[in-house]
């Protein structure tokens, strides 16, 4: 076998020409198979991928960028604003994206922004500089200027979440609304009839969805909706403490509180402690996210957890599919969270513990820590 251009001393670099000769396929077919194009059959893509692995083929990123006009990079812009809500899930999330990108021979390009306006400007800059081929957009808003920009520029993107105007959007999301409904049903099954709700920032798309889930749970349990038992705007422990305190200071306070976010629930813990209430006995709390701090709270927090590593990997794969022109109708998916039952919820005070009433379908449950 003759040495190709670009070889290093004492080493031979396998090229597409080598794969083409080995497989008896044209260079164009091999190239499109390696890049996952839909016009190449699955059997051919698999055959080419196996040969590339066996022969040690590794594409030169710079040459590919020149030839295809693609950077072979996924983009992610993180808002590093003062609420720091990325932090609880960031490590696993990035790991999931990076591993999926590496499997395709792509990279992940991460940038940070100071606020929403800076996010949009940073995305526009990365597009103008041809640094990435598409974006993963976390923390989606009901009305999201990042989505408007990328739609206008016709740049591929995938949402981690949903949005108000779904035109031209692909997404992977977790059904937070179902988790909130199931939390209400679980608490009602334990005997609670006054169940409060502490929501997050109403500008983010998850907030109205989770509120709808809470209301659906009340309706399914046959409980009335009392607007006094609902608070919003809690995305930090400090805000959770304030909103939880408002509920606990009502003349007829709730015996249980469902929180849209674990971080807010940890604030409700503080509010309860300040009033001499014991979580899990005097006040039940169920939340959503499955952050590590939830497992170490006293008592450990019952929560609907999200596998952020799996979500990151799935988002990367959906973005690859979108970049390659897959039908948007096949790139929209919502999956369930799973319940981690811990010590923060139980029967209401002054009641005898007993078997829970069966008020609806039981969500997937995992006991203990994530």
Image (cartoon, rainbow, N blue to C red):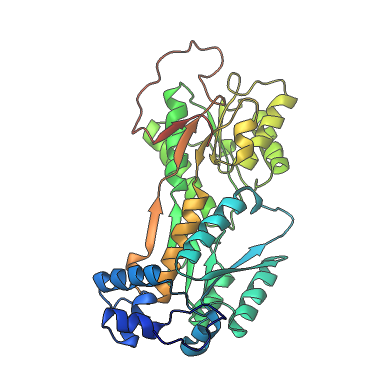
Residue at position x 34%, y 77% from top?
33
Q: Position of residue 326 (x, y in %)?
A: 35, 73
Residue at position x 37%, y 68% from top?
54
- Is 165 placed above or below 216 here? below
Foreground pick, 177 / 36:
36
Foreground pick, 368 / 73:
73
Foreground pick, 304 / 74:
74
- Is 238 placed above or below 34 here? above
- Is 4 placed above or below 296 here? below
Q: In which quarter of the image is residue 80?
A: bottom right
Q: Where is residue 261 in the image (x, y as percent from the top left)?
A: 58, 43
- Is 4 placed above or below 150 here? below
Quarter in which the N terminus is drawn:
bottom left
Q: Where is residue 218 in the image (x, y as percent from the top left)?
A: 43, 35
Residue at position x 26%, y 70% from top?
42
Tag count in the figure?
0
Left or right: where does residue 240 sit relative to residue 321?
right
Residue at the far top: name it: 352
Residue at position x 67%, y 40% from top?
240
Q: Where is residue 351 in the image (x, y as percent from the top left)?
A: 51, 12
Q: Can residue 169 be seen in this view?
A: no
């Amino acid at each position: 076998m003759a040495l190709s251009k670009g070889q290093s001393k004492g080493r031979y670099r396998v090229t597409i020409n080598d794969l083409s000769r080995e497989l008896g396929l044209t260079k164009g077919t091999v190239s499109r198979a390696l890049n996952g194009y839909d016009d190449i059959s699955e059997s051919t893509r698999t055959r080419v991928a196996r040969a590339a692995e066996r022969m040690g083929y590794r594409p030169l990123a710079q040459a590919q960028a020149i030839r295809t006009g693609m950077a072979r990079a996924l983009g992610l812009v993180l808002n590093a604003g003062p609420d720091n809500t990325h932090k609880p899930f960031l490590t696993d999330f990035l790991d999931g994206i990076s591993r999926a990108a590496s499997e395709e021979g792509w990279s992940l390009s991460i940038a940070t922004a100071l606020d929403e306006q800076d996010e949009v400007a940073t995305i526009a800059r990365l597009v103008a500089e041809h640094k990435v081929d598409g974006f993963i957009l976390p923390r989606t808003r009901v009305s999201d200027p990042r989505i408007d920009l990328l739609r206008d520029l016709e740049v591929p993107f995938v949402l981690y979440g949903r949005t108000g105007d779904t035109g031209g959007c692909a997404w992977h999301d977790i059904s937070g609304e179902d988790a909130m409904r199931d939390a209400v049903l679980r608490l009602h099954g334990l005997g609670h009839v006054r169940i409060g709700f502490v929501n997050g920032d109403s500008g983010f798309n998850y907030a109205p969805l989770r509120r709808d889930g809470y209301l659906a749970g009340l309706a399914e349990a046959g409980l009335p909706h009392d607007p006094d038992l609902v608070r919003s705007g809690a995305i930090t422990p400090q805000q959770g403490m304030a909103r939880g305190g408002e509920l606990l200071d009502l003349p007829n306070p709730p015996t249980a509180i469902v929180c849209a976010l674990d971080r807010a629930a940890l604030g409700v813990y503080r509010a309860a402690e300040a009033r001499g209430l014991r979580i899990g006995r005097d006040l039940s709390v169920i939340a959503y996210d499955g952050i590590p701090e939830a497992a170490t709270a006293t008592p450990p927090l019952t929560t609907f957890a999200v596998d952020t590593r799996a979500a990151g990997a799935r988002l990367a794969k959906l973005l690859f599919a979108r970049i390659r022109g897959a039908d948007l109708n096949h790139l929209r998916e919502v999956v369930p969270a799973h319940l981690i039952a811990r010590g923060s919820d139980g029967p209401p005070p002054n009641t005898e513990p007993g078997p829970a009433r069966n008020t609806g379908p039981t969500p997937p449950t995992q006991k203990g820590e994530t």
